[in-house]
Amino acid sequence: MGFKDIVSIIFDESELRGLNDLDKKEDIYQWILEHGMSTKKRFLYLDFRGEEGYEIVNFILDYESKYDIELASQKELGQLGEYEYEFLQEKIREVNKIISSKGYGLFSFPTTGDYYALFISILANKKELLQDELLVNENVPLRERYIQLYE
């Protein structure tokens, strides 16, 4: 699957203006992070240390509202908000236990910074999302150059 195909899974078609002008893989990678940061629609950016308050819960609620779906019950979201974790990946795994029953996952996009770029996608796209190395940087461990799904 091509890099631009992955972009079309992450973003709505209406958000892809200007992408056709990009021709290098690195440019598209940077475009994804910058576009996600500027619009704050598709990505949740969290410091490696974790979240402050209910950022993941609020992200899920916003996604549910935007697409008129239910990924988790109010009770599950309440428990998720109170979930104690040492490493953020643990909480992401808990999120995925909950929303995977609805066919969705919380994925982590590779970054070179000290933060996570998280997005929600349909699990039917899992194979396509996880297969391509997106970040070309020898200083980053190979596994972290790919989109990840903590299960």
Image (spheres, rainbow, N blue to C red):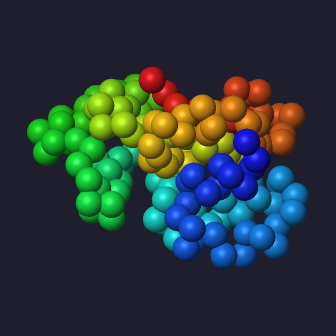
Task: Tell me the quarter of the picture where residue 98 sits.
Answer: top left
Quadrant placement of the C terminus:
top left
Residue 80 image offset from top left, x and y in percent: 24, 36
Q: How many marks?
A: 0
Q: Nearer the viewer, residue 110 or 46?
A: 110
Residue 43 image offset from top left, x and y in percent: 50, 56
Residue 76 image offset from top left, x and y in percent: 18, 36
Task: Tell me the quarter of the picture where residue 140 sits.
Answer: top right
Q: What residue is shown at x 54% (from left), y 40% (from top)?
A: 125
| Residue 42 in the image: above or below residue 118 | below
Q: What residue is shown at x 55% (from left), y 73% (from top)?
A: 14
Observer able to see residue 94: no
Quadrant placement of the N terminus:
top right
Observer able to see residue 128: yes
Left or right? Give the position of 68 relative to 40: left
Q: What residue is shown at x 76% (from left), y 36% (from top)?
A: 133
Q: What residue is shown at x 83% (from left), y 53% (from top)?
A: 25
Left or right? Give the position of 80 relative to 41: left
Residue 130 image offset from top left, x and y in percent: 63, 33
Task: Tell me the quarter of the picture where residue 74 sits.
Answer: top left
Q: Nearer the viewer, residue 116 or 22?
A: 22
